[in-house]
């Protein structure tokens, strides 16, 4: 019997073959391959880009580049995409995956290092139309506060994993800092009058934020 996620994937746009290969390879080579956005969310990221038609995109948390390519696929060649990954050991794999895409990825700029430092020192002069936050959950609120001034009026921020495997509904352990910070982020977003916001129960929760 199909579960909900399987049903949604079967009845949505199909995952392209090149992304299927990237996902399969990651599951073979990496222990934490479940961090990949996945087919359903990847198609949603693509569609968001097709709707918003951004000129500048920022992604925090490249991982293997799966979500980056979904953003690029929807945005098209004229869009500049800055993506930040803290794990330098993933750089070769990321570039390999970018090169495997069936479209030009020269518009993607990969930054390796701490996201907050890179945003502060390298990206202050860019007005972003779309930001996708999928980095260290313990720094979500810091990411948000760093990027909101860089997002144009009417621009969007997407924050992944905001339902956090349902842990936000449970009794939180004192040493579960990731869950604590996701809750802090969600509470802050809920009360921030500078934005409009809605949490979509897609995969592990995707918060859609529009800057007023």
Image (tube, rainbow, N blue to C red):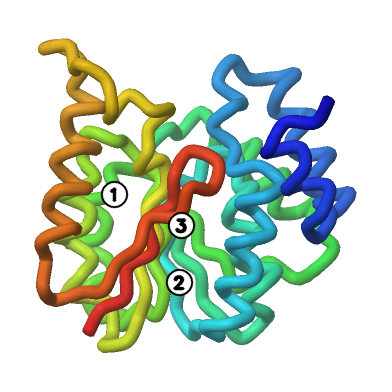
Position above or below: 202 against 13: above
Separation (CA) of disc 2 from disc 3? 8 Å
Crowd rating for badge 3 (residues with CA inside 10 Å; few <14, some 14–19, many 20+): many
- Between circles 2 and 3, the one closer to the viewer is 2
The tag on residue 2 is: none
Q: Quadrant of residue 72?
A: bottom right
Could you tell me which secondary element the residue under label 2 belongs to? Answer: strand
Q: Is residue 107 above or below residue 43?
A: below
The dot on residue 57 is 2
Q: Give left or right: position of 105 versus 149.
A: right
Task: Measure how far apart labels 3 and 1 are at the Cα level.
Answer: 9 Å
Observer able to see residue 76: yes
Quadrant in which the C terminus is drawn: bottom left
Which residue in the rendered view is the most extreme toward the front?
Answer: 1
Image quadrant holding the N terminus, namely top right
Q: Which residue is mark 1?
A: 115
Residue located beneath label 3 in the image: 83
């Amino acid at each position: 019997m199909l579960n909900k996620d399987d049903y949604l994937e079967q009845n949505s746009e199909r995952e392209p073959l090149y992304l299927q290969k990237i996902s399969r390879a990651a599951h073979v080579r990496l222990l934490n391959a479940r961090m990949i956005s996945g087919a359903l969310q990847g198609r949603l990221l693509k569609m968001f880009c097709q709707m918003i038609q951004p000129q500048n995109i920022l992604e925090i948390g490249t991982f293997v580049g799966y979500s980056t390519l979904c953003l690029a696929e929807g945005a098209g060649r004229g869009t500049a995409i800055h993506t930040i990954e803290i794990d330098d050991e993933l750089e070769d794999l990321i570039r390999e995956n970018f090169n495997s895409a069936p479209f030009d990825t020269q518009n993607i700029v990969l930054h390796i290092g701490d996201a907050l430092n890179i945003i502060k020192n390298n990206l202050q002069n860019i007005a972003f139309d779309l930001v996708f936050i999928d980095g260290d959950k313990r720094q979500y609120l810091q990411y948000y506060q760093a990027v909101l001034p860089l997002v144009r009026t009417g621009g969007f921020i997407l924050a992944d994993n905001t339902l956090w495997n349902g842990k936000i509904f449970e009794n939180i352990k004192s040493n579960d800092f990731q869950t604590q910070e996701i809750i802090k982020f969600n509470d802050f977003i809920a009360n921030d009058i500078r934005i409009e916001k809605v949490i979509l129960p897609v995969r592990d929760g995707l918060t859609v934020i529009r800057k007023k």
